[in-house]
Image: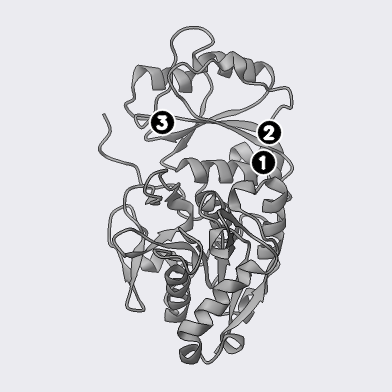
Amino acid sequence: MKKILIVLTGGTIGSQVEGECVNVTDTSPYQLLRFYEEAYGKKEGGIEEAFEVIQPMAILSENIGLEAWSRLCRVMWEIPYEKYAGVIVTHGSDTLSYTSALLGLLLGHVEIPVVLTASNYPLGEKGSNGLVNFRSAVELIRTGLLRGVFTIYQNRKGENIVYLATRLTEADGYLDQFGSFGGVPFGRMEEGKFRYISNAVNPGLSQLMEKRSRIAEECPVLLQNILFLRPYPGFDYETVDLTKKPAAVLHGLHHSSTACVAGETGSLLWLLKKCRRMDIPVYAASVKDAAGRNYESARKLLEKGAIPMENISSEAAYAKLLLLYNLFGAAAKEKVGETFYFENLPKCVNIL
């Protein structure tokens, strides 16, 4: 039986508690394997027989930046996937949805399961789901049913949810619960078995197993930044500093595909005009139907040059632009409309 490769990056699932402080060290991520061996080692035939382990970084995920992401991308890009039954990436929960989207787009062509997971509390603490999440990731790989990139995380109901990596949405700040863009996760792990959730927004299992092309022939180095802005009442766009000139601007939208177009510097139209003068493309996400019926404010944004990204989460839109602009430069604009790994959902019929 082929081994599973474990890629340790830190986060709560790889942290230790010292007094009132939770932090990672070079050795703390290996606690996960010690806990797993105590619980399941005999059944798996021993840790050394079941897993191979690498640790490219030990970092709390809120501290991840483009340099660390570039390092992780390079490590993941160079893995000889044919050697393994699957790959598990342990990660912090704060930015799990962003790294999931990034690796989903980068590795959607991989022919084995790549599974990201995390933990709500440090391992060993009451209520921690880290070991359960890791176990579910192992079980998903051992089923041999799937290929592609997924994220697994147990919710407060005790359900072991399987997400398509490009559809995971950020956990809320109160209950620490993740969501799935489109409202429906891809499946669940139940007693070691994968249960697919059949829904119009989910690709079928046969579609998931289709061969996909790489997003590029080389791994990107993330040097060009994307400025990501979110709308809120009272946003004064004159405060946005474009001195460093990002490769592009991603502007989030309200759920109805809108943002403010009234007034002067409080209007996104003001920023669109400024960016046009500086030759900075501005993308808007998520747009439900750029060519269909829209609110007047949404129509104005598109007329004045906002480039629509349709039916995509904020995390996936950001990761997609970051990858494409660092891979293709200005030519990225021609590729944004492509779907690489299920990041664009089917058109929603319930609009307006």
Which amino acid, mark 3?
Answer: Ala
Label 1 sits on residue: 325
Residue at 39% over, 18% down: 297
The colour scheme is: one colour
Image side of residue 218 versus residue 40, left or right: right
Earlier residue among tags 1 and 2: 2
Q: Secondary structure at mark 1?
A: helix
Label 2 sits on residue: 247
Earlier residue among tags 3 and 1: 3
Dot 1 and dot 2 residues touching (CB under 8 Å): yes
Q: Position of residue 292 (x, y in %)?
A: 34, 29
Say which quadrant the C terminus sits in: top left
Q: Nearer the viewer, residue 114 or 331?
A: 114
Which amino acid, mark 1?
Answer: Tyr
Image side of residue 242 versus residue 307, left or right: right
Kindly report the distance in space between the C-alpha atoms of the residues bearing marks 1 and 2.
Answer: 7 Å
Which amino acid, mark 2?
Answer: Ala
